[in-house]
Image: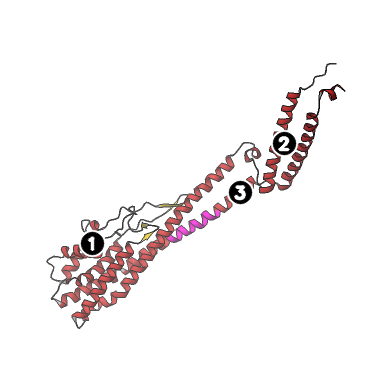
Amino acid sequence: MTRISVGDASMTNILARQGADLRGQVQRASNEVATGRHDDIALVLRGDLTPVLAIDASLSRLAAFKTTTTDAAFQASTQQTTLSGLSSLAAGITTTLLGAIDFPTTAQVNAVAADARARLESVIGLLNAQASGRSVFSGAATDTAPLGASDDLLAALETAATGATTAAAVAGAVVNWFADPLGYGTFYQGGDPLAPAPIAPGESADLSTTALDPTIRDTLAGFAMAALLDRGMLSGNAVERSRLAQRAGQVLLTSEDSRIALTAKIGTVEAQIESARTRNAAEGTALGILRSDIGSADPYEAATRLETARVQLESLYLVTARVSRLNLVDFLR
């Protein structure tokens, strides 16, 4: 009977391949024991990575929503803070302006006019507020402040009211200028309203409020009417100056309901964003747990494979050592 033997070179190659394979098994099993996760998920799933890819895609989408909801929440919060500031500034002077018709001296009208002008500057400063370096009332032109200086605004209004000699005429000129696309519409330096911000699958938040909003226009108009008095509007006519101050107070009072409504609108958006953030976070947590479960390795099974591979590798080393010590004399014996 003919005996077929394996040559020394072939035996060396076989042992080397087996050694490399066993070392790889030891390495993979060691990693799984140490990390608690499969070293080769594709092998565990028999090449079908569809579930893992689907989960990873969902997690990536939720990560993108996290960024947009954070930005949207910051913008809405800044707008809300601004509107609160506008309401506070208006509340602090409305009653005084309404009572201006009964002021006994022109000095009191002059004082409230100076106060109104300072408040107008504060209002414009609030409307030019930024969130993360972006103007929140400029619409899509987030790199541009929506409004210019208060002095420029008042100068434009003075031009619009040229020739007016009564409080009613000045007030009418101010209201018309704010409604005119070539008046306040030109003074506004922002862009078109922002598109709805995606905050969750199939859901977006309305962040379209800009300094062109009618509520903001009316509020500015009220402050501007009174501030014009501080620039000498209707000078020499104490009665008409008092009436203009009173008209300014009426505009601020009338626009109060609109400010409350706009505040409520933005508050609703804030609540919507927060609800979306909560849902997204819960979904992300659930998907993360599922993703971890798919990749988790059984520590007992991994330890068993590690020990088996280690024993086999030690046996291979022993066989290799014995084979490497063979020589012709030992073979012929």
* Disc 3: which residue: 290
Residue 164 appears left or right of 195:
left
- Residue 34 lies, in percent from the top left, at 68, 48
Q: Is 278 in the magenta? A: yes
Q: Nearer the viewer, residue 197 or 316?
A: 316
Question: What's under tag 1, amino acid-wise?
Answer: Phe
Would you say the residues marked 1 and 2 are in contact, meaning their CB atoms lie under 8 Å apart? no
The mark that comes first in sequence, 3 or 1, is: 1
Please give the label number shown on residue 10: none
- Residue 123 lies, in percent from the top left, at 30, 67
Q: Is residue 110 visible?
A: yes
Q: Is residue 95 above or below residue 318?
A: below
Q: Residues within 10 Å of mark 1 (few under 14, many from 20)?
A: many
Query: From mark 1 to mark 2, how far is it between C-alphas?
Result: 82 Å
The segment highlighted magenta reads 270-282
User: Which image quadrant: the C terminus?
Assistant: top right
Residue 245 occupies which quadrant of the picture?
Answer: bottom left
Q: Nearer the viewer, residue 264 or 291?
A: 291
Residue shown at 35% from the left, 66% from the top: 83
The mark that comes first in sequence, 1 or 2, is: 2
Camera-nearest label, 1 or 2: 2
- Residue 265 lies, in percent from the top left, at 39, 62
* Disc 2: which residue: 22
* Disc 1: which residue: 178
Camera-nearest label, 3 or 2: 2
The mark that comes first in sequence, 3 or 2, is: 2
Residue 276 appears left or right of 24:
left
